[in-house]
Image (cartoon, coloured by chain):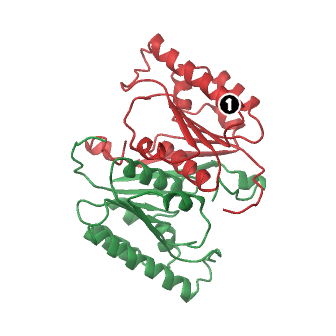
Chain colours: A green, B red
């Protein structure tokens, strides 16, 4: 760690259909922690999923997280009101975390997909970005990032699936996929 | 954590010119740790770079890392013998870690780029993959992954740069880029 000032805080987006979006956000969180920054992660969907990383994150200082949504997978063709309500609560939690002054980095996990599936409105995310204090870095993950969000972001990486073991019939693996 | 057996161990590659490759590997390491797995990370280049994550990783159980190379950036048009030697040492360390039986996940950070820049031979990495015990997961990161490695891998994500703040003249930022 050094005393070099950290001045620029940006908006980063990890989108695309390939594996590595949430992982990249987690790695970014780890890096920020290692430099003494304070991190908050909000999971917009699959909040009860037993993601392995939470066991570790929960033991580290300066990082907190709020899971929303449920273990079952949402059917985007038939979104239930209760699923929308969970995503709206996540959005409100995001608003509060970003404005709180308690965090240097706020990760909004799967927020892009939540908007794409109309659990929340893209306009609400745009509002979050516009109202973001200058000293807060935002990371947005999830497939199907809206073009308006990409336009507003400073850094955008598209994770493109070249190969995925799901295609070979290999199911999600504990320790590697969750 | 649950007791479900972990059977399939694969080869994952994160390549492409966008941000998120090393971060995705780190996030993957965190996830594996959270499920009780043992992780080893070998940095093939920029071994002395003050990556923030190492401060945190060093505090966690079941994870270790070996950095090789130096802080200065390598000029791929003028690779020095000593830089090759560092990469060869990294390769040897990888060989030993993979065969040791001590690790469930071995991350070879920037190994793709090390091969692309001819610090090491692609054939050597192919050898690592071929000799890998079935119960070891491998993650290879770095731009310019060789087509033969992609062919052998089970999971490949290309991180495509859509936008990067470097293009706007923003330099690498402590806590976010290192």
Residue A66 placement (x, y as % from top left): 46, 72
Residue B3 placement (x, y as % from top left): 75, 61
Q: Label 1: how many residues lie within 10 Å, few (<14), some (14-19) or many (20+)? A: few
Q: In which quarter of the image is the C terminus of chain A?
A: bottom right
Q: In this view, does A2 lie above or below B47?
A: below
Residue A38 placement (x, y as % from top left): 34, 58
Which image quarter: residue A177?
A: bottom right
Viewer-proximal residue among B126 and B56: B56
Q: In this view, does A24 lie above or below B118?
A: below
Q: Which residue is drawn at 37% across and 36% down?
A: B50
Residue B61 placement (x, y as % from top left): 55, 47
Q: Is residue B162 above or below residue B149?
A: below
Q: Which residue is drawn at 51% across and 40% down?
A: B16
Which image quarter: residue B79?
A: top left
Viewer-proximal residue among B173 and B151: B173
Residue A38 in sight? yes
Residue assigned mark 1: B148
How many circles with numbers are drawn on the protein? Answer: 1
């Amino acid at each position: 760690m050094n005393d070099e000032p950290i001045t620029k805080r940006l908006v980063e987006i990890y989108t695309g259909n390939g594996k590595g979006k949430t992982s990249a956000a987690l790695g970014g969180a780890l890096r920020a922690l290692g430099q003494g920054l304070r991190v908050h992660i909000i999971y917009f969907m699959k909040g009860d999923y037993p993601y392995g990383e939470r066991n570790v994150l929960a033991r580290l200082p300066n990082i907190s997280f709020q899971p929303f949504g449920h273990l079952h997978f949402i059917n985007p063709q038939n979104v239930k009101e209760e699923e929308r309500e969970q995503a709206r609560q996540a959005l409100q939690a995001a608003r509060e975390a970003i404005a709180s002054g308690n965090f240097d980095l706020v990760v909004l996990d799967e927020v892009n997909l939540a908007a794409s599936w109309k659990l929340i409105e893209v306009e609400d995310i745009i509002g979050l970005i516009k109202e973001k204090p200058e000293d807060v870095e935002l990371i947005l993950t999830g497939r199907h990032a809206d073009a308006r969000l990409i336009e507003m972001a400073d850094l955008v990486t598209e994770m493109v699936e070249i190969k995925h073991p799901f295609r070979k019939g290999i199911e999600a693996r504990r320790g590697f996929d969750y």
